[in-house]
Image: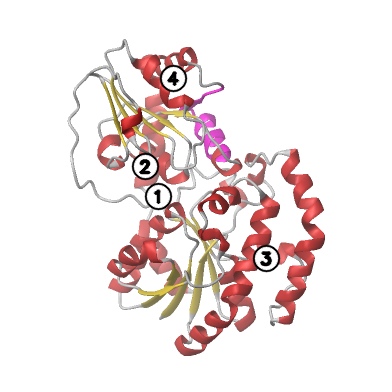
């Protein structure tokens, strides 16, 4: 089987797919993966042929734009339609050469879905967040300002849709691009238990569990309780890190903070607190007792896989949905402020109430019972 795969320039949307790509290529299928140079090595290591998209007018490569996509629905839609148009000629040429049997694309790499529609090729959505429909979308609390922006952007978006139609894309409106339904074959990288409203999705949705890489290194546990803090790369307000340092300064906890920036800014640290630009997250989670997180889907899934309860501090609507679900299932506490008193109170509540640990264990068990990359490969082969 020849498979063409499309993704966006984001670690959280690429990394979960790589185990499946490796599973497919290991079974003799040919995978051609359209992505960006920063991911070339990982993709080729998984056995796929890599096609770079960097040289095209792909505005989402800009870090500021990439961050804005998660927060501004109008901007995201406009940008992703622009990206489809920018890639159109190159993708047309490659599809004609490859003659794929199947197109798989990230759920917001709309150019993949549109390419499948244009050339009448079977399509599968790769959903690295929750699957969203009319029921589960209630977990995505879109701000009123975002909805107004979407409303006022519609004339511009409609103009872009006309450009797509002129290029041969058979779409009638914006919903044809952004909306999947129960007839869309979809791979979802979580369990049915963690997916909100899972019973509202058809059997065309294959819930394979999170993609968890093997533990490659070890970190020493130096205290009875270990707190891990990582807010991803989009956190602009650094106050939370400083407040965490003050909250945990006079405790007996081992505290590991991954900053995503220069750790030398943080001086006068007590012995129990260590800050790093980056860490081996899997190694830290394997010894952690609490994880303070921005609620990225991958980070939360990795923590729950290792049965680590969560302090939840989401920054985007998508992360907000993950936070709501984790709290709903009893595996975490949402942090309402970044005051050191609130950080410490949430931590102590999780450490003293075993129900949070038990909830995390239950979710972990569900993850481990999923079929993983093998189930996804079999799902694709049946198509």
**Label 2 vs 3, first from the N-terminus:** 3
Q: Is residue 332 left or right of residue 278?
A: right
Q: Are marks 1 and 2 in contact (CB under 8 Å)?
A: yes
In the rendered image of this protein, does residue 314 appear above or below residue 297?
above
Q: Which residue is mark 4?
A: 243
Q: CA distance from mark 4 to mark 2?
A: 25 Å
Q: Secondary structure at mark 2?
A: helix
Q: CA distance from mark 4 to mark 1?
A: 31 Å
Mark in the foreground, 3 or 4: 4
Give the x, y percent position of residue 175: 72, 62
In the rendered image of this protein, does residue 207 appear above or below residue 48?
above
Q: Quick check: is 334 in the magenta stretch?
A: yes
Q: CA distance from mark 1 to mark 2?
A: 8 Å
Q: CA distance from mark 1 to mark 3?
A: 26 Å
Q: Is residue 247 left or right of residue 328?
A: left
Question: What's the mark number on residue 210?
Answer: 1
Q: Which residue is mark 3?
A: 177
Give the x, y percent position of residue 278: 31, 40
Out of 357 and 273, give the one closest to the viewer.
273
Mark in the foreground, 4 or 2: 4
Q: Which residue is mark 2?
A: 302
**Label 4 vs 1, first from the N-terminus:** 1
Out of 145 and 261, give the one closest to the viewer.
261
Image quadrant for the N terminus? Answer: bottom left
């Amino acid at each position: 089987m020849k498979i063409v795969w499309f993704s966006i320039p984001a670690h959280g949307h690429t990394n979960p797919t790589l185990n499946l790509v490796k599973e497919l290529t290991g079974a003799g299928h040919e995978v051609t993966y359209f992505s960006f140079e920063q991911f070339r090595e990982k993709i080729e290591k998984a056995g796929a042929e890599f096609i770079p998209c960097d040289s095209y007018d792909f505005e989402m490569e800009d870090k500021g734009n990439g961050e804005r996509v998660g927060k501004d629905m109008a901007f995201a839609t406009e940008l992703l339609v622009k990206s489809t148009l920018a890639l159109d000629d190159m993708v047309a040429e490659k599809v004609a050469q490859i003659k794929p049997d199947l197109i798989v694309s990230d759920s917001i790499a709309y150019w993949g879905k549109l390419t499948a529609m244009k050339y009448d090729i079977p399509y599968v959505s790769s959903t690295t967040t929750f699957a969203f429909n009319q029921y589960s979308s209630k977990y995505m609390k879109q701000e009123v300002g975002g909805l107004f922006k979407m409303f006022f952007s519609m004339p511009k978006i409609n103009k872009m849709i006309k450009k797509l139609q002129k290029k041969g894309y058979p779409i009638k409106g914006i919903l044809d691009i952004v909306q999947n339904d129960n007839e869309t074959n979809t791979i979802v990288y979580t369990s049915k238990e963690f997916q909100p409203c899972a019973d509202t999705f058809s059997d065309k949705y294959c819930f394979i569990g999170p993609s968890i890489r093997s533990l490659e290194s070890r970190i020493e546990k130096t205290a009875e309780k270990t707190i891990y803090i990582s807010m991803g790369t989009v956190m602009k307000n650094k106050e939370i890190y400083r407040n965490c340092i003050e909250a945990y300064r006079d405790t007996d906890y081992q505290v590991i903070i991954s900053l995503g920036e220069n750790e030398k800014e943080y001086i006068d640290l007590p012995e129990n607190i260590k800050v790093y630009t980056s860490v081996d997250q899997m190694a830290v989670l394997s010894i952690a007792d609490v994880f303070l997180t921005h609620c990225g889907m991958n980070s939360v899934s990795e923590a729950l896989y290792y049965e680590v309860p969560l302090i939840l501090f989401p920054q985007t609507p998508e992360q907000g949905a993950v936070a709501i679900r984790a709290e709903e299932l009893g595996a975490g506490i949402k942090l309402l402020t970044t005051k050191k008193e609130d950080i410490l109170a949430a931590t102590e509540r999780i450490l003293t109430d075993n129900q949070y640990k038990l909830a995390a264990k239950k979710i972990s068990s569900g993850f481990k019972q999923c079929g993983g990359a093998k189930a996804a490969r079999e799902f694709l082969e049946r198509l």
